[in-house]
Amino acid sequence: MRNVRLVIAYDGTDFHGWQSQPELRTVQGTIEQAVRRVARHQVELIGSGRTDARVHAAGQVANFNTECRIPTEKLARAIGSRLPKDICLTDVREVSPEFHSTRSALNKLYRYRIHNARLRPVTRLAQRQTYHFWQPLDLGRIRAAARHLVGTMDFAAMASKGSERETTVRTVLRCDVERWYDEVRISVIGCGFLYNQVRNMVGTLLEIGRGHWEPDHMADILAGADRRAAGPTAPARGLCLQWVRYPANLLRPTGNAADAPGGDAQP
C-alpha cells in the first residue's frame, strides 16, 4: 500500500468548499472522482484542512492510500488530466506511511487580499480573488493591531459558530501586513485555526484600519472572548491557503530514496 501526497491549487469561486457533500461540487469530491478513475478503487482523500465555499488555495495538501503501481510522475499526469480547469496538481509524491495531511501538519499560511481603491478589482481582473474595500486604510494602525494577534492565546472572539472544538486556544506565529499598489495583503501563519478565524481577524483589522477602533482595542476584544465584540467576517473570496509545512522525515517514502522529495510542502 502506497501513501501518495498531493499539493493542490484551486480557484474556490465555483466550489462549495473543500469537504465532499452530496449533490454539491466540492474540491475533495472532484479530486476523489479523478483519483478513483485512475487507481480503479475507492479512495479517501485526506485534506490538511477544510476551506469554505469560495476560499482559494495555492498549496492545499491531501493524501490517499492506494495499491495502484503507476509511478508518481505518470500518476500526476493521469489524475491531473481528469481534473477541471479550476484545479491543478502542483506536486504528487509518495510519502511515509505515517504521513497524514491533517495530523502531521506543523503550520500553514493563509493570505487575505484586499483591493483597497475606489475602482473595483475588475480593473486588475482580480474580482474573484480579492475583497473590494474602497475606504482608505491606515496600514500603521493595522500593523499595530496585528501585533496583538501573535502568540498562543484564546481566540474565542475570532471564532464563528459552526464547528466542534475542544478548545479555542490557538497559536499564531506571524501576522504580516503589506501593500502592493492598490492591494493590501494580510498573511497569517499559525499552527491551526478555528472556523473563520482568519476572516474574522481580517474583518476586525479592517475596522481598526479605517479608524473605527484604536489599535490597542484588539487586546480588549481578545480578552473579552466574545465574537460579538469583534469586527465582521471578511468575505471568503479574498482568502487563500498558500502552503502547509510538514516534518521532512514524513515526506520520504520508506525504502525509496530515489522518489523522496527534497523539502516540505511550502512552494
Image (tube, rainbow, N blue to C red):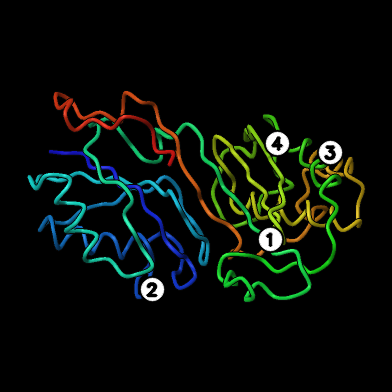
Sequence-wise, the earlier of marks 2 and 3 is 2
Q: Position of residue 65 (x, y in %)?
A: 20, 44
Mark 3, residue position: 219
Q: Which mark is residue 114?
A: 1
Sequence-wise, the earlier of marks 4 and 3 is 4
Sequence-wise, the earlier of marks 3 and 1 is 1
- Between disc 3 and disc 1, the foreground one is 1
Give the residue at x 85% y 62%. 136
Is there any visible trace of residue 252 in the rendered image? yes
Disc 4 vs disc 3: Cβ atoms closer than 8 Å? no
Q: Which mark is residue 83?
A: none
Spatial CA span between label 2 and label 4: 34 Å
- SS at circle 2: loop
Is there any visible trace of residue 208 in the rendered image? no
Residue toward you, 240 or 3? 240
- Residue 47 in the figure: left or right of residue 148: left
User: Hey, which quadrant is residue 217 in on the image?
Assistant: top right
User: Hey, which quadrant is residue 15 in on the image?
Assistant: bottom left
Mark 4, residue position: 154
